Amino acid sequence: MKIVVLVKQVPDTAEERKLDLATGQLGRESADNVIDEINERALESALRIKDANKGTEVVAMTMGPDEASQALRKALSMGADSAVHILDDSLEGADTGRTAATLAAALRSTGFDVVLAGNESTDGRAGVVPAMVAEHLQLPLLGSLISAEIADGAVSGVRQGDGGTLNVHAGLPAILTVTERFPEARFPNFKGILTAKRKPVATLSVSALEVPASASRTVVVSTVERPPRAAGRKLIDDGTAANELAEFLVVNRLV
Amino acid sequence: MSNVLALIEISHRGEIAASSRGLLVAAATLGSPIAVVVSSEPLADDDVARLGELGAARIYSAVTPAAGTVLVAPAVDALSRAVEAYEPAAVLTTNTADGREAAARLAVRTGGSVLADVVQVRTDNGTVVAQHSVFGGAYTVESAVDGGLPILTIRQGAIEGQAPATTADVSTAVMEATTAGAAVIDRFNDDPVVSARPELRSAATVVSGGRGLGSPENFVLVEQLADALGAAIGASRAAVDAGYIAQTAQVGQTGVSVSPQLYVALGISGAIQHRAGMQTAKTIVAINKDEDAPIFDVADFGIVGDIFTVVPKLVEAIKARSN
């Protein structure tokens, strides 16, 4: 079985992230750029299948600037067999529609039985790219899963809905997205880090993929930074702090 | 006035989702709201009346045996038919898993673009403009679609108010069940607990607990304060990972984003990922024994103290004042 895991390099959520106020685009310099944690969980579930079935092939695919190759290198050191980097200056600032059309074209050329992705990235949080890819490829999407069973010819899983969960299934090929309820990812071991350097990374350009141009795109109209919050009163509890807080809530009509 | 489609989510038990109110407020702001509803049986009179009360000028009722058995695809089919029939200026869905996937597929099918996780809408000389709250409210970004149909996913609980009530006209379309290229739903597993507390996303007051609670049993402290304040219950990711409470209560970068009048953080250190889900609250109160906890940097009122002594006293004091 061939599993392609979609990975995205994002600014580390543990640091302050910035937008460029002129363009509304991500300020890539503001925080360290790392592989998104949700993608690591997707990769982990692919690697567990590979652990159990040696014939499984795991490919990590990303679209992003030069620096995004570091995210692929991390995926390779965790255990992916090879990687695909869609690298093209014309993709700078690509919206979800352009991103999905490009990924769909790359997936078509790479080939797969299963595509695994995160349910949403921590930077854009739109959560629409996997479903757009599924529509381009006319494939079923099992999205927002909290668990999954991937077997030859079929996938099933439990999807997190609004007031509960749903059991869902589909035939292969199919696209799955995982949520944080999936197990945490393994750390790359020494052997993994060493062998990652020898694993193949294919670079694809947009012209090679023949991605059709779209007549529709999203544009940023304005970007405004919210002033940071200031700290207010801070009391060390001496036994009266609870009463003072109750008074504060009453005065501010919050009870 | 331009037509605006709103995909109404109906649970498998037949209940109209609470998010429909905000969705139809947004639709009415942009034009004449048409509620698109997918169901296996024709809509009951009660549902038609209810959607009219919520502001739907028209209901496009798609009836198909695939509703409730095929995942998302029936909604996409219904929306694309309605797009053809009504040539809308915009399509709105809720920013749920179902709503996002329907919006995404519709964008590819119709050649439109998605504006995701929208917290407010307006029109500017006929252009639909969407507002987003980015990086936990650190930025407010406005976006629009250049060429093609704007498809907006509206954040639950973000848009308040009530659209003007109407009596909705109903158009019914019978759709065949297509399963090609779609996942099949085998079973629904409802959450067992139906809480009398307010819904987290739209609550005016939220009380959240963190790792400082120490155990699932101790989480009752959060419940007691929440009930004294009439609040919804939230949690930090640390508390969810530790198994104190269900994941659906998670507030933060990867959970629910809330903007209540009052947010009370109990035993929450306030890592940047948690603050990303609550820092737009009007008033923030924090109680934590660690004087250096970053939550105090954003708190309007902070108490450095033991939650197990401060919170019971606070509950008593609130009850005494409200009597």
Image (cartoon, coloured by chain):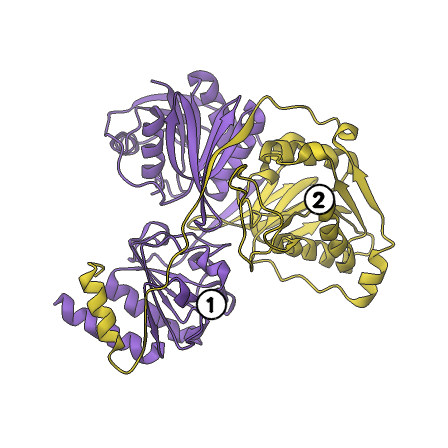
Image colour for chain B is purple
Q: Which amino acid does label 2 sit on?
A: Thr
Whole-percent x, y for residue B45 in the image: 27, 30
Residue assigned mark 2 = A62
Q: Nearer the viewer, residue A18 or B236?
A: A18
Whole-percent x, y for residue A119 in the image: 57, 47
Name which residue lies at 32% across and 53% down.
B260
Image colour for chain A is yellow
Residue assigned mark 1 = B239
Q: In the rendered image, which quarter is residue A241 located in?
A: bottom left
Real-space CA distance between mark 2 and mark 1, rounded to the nearest whole angstrom = 32 Å
Mark 2 element type: strand
Name which residue lies at 33% across and 49% down.
B202
Q: Which residue lies furthest to the front in this view?
A: A22
Callout 1 crowding tier (Cα within 10 Å): few <14, some 14–19, many ≥20: many
Q: In the rendered image, which quarter is residue A188 located in?
A: bottom right
Q: Which residue lies furthest to the bottom in this view?
A: A238
Name which residue lies at 42% across and 30% down.
B129
What is the chain identity of the residue bearing mark 2?
A
Q: Which residue lies furthest to the left in this view?
A: B323
Q: In the rendered image, which quarter is residue B220 located in?
A: bottom left
Whole-percent x, y for residue A102 in the image: 69, 33
The answer to whether one can see residue A138 in this image is: no
The answer to whether one can see residue A216 in this image is: yes
Q: Which of A255 and B73 is in front in this view?
A: A255
Rendered position, B160 above or below A179: above
Q: What residue type is labelled 1?
A: Ala
Whole-percent x, y for residue B243 in the image: 49, 68
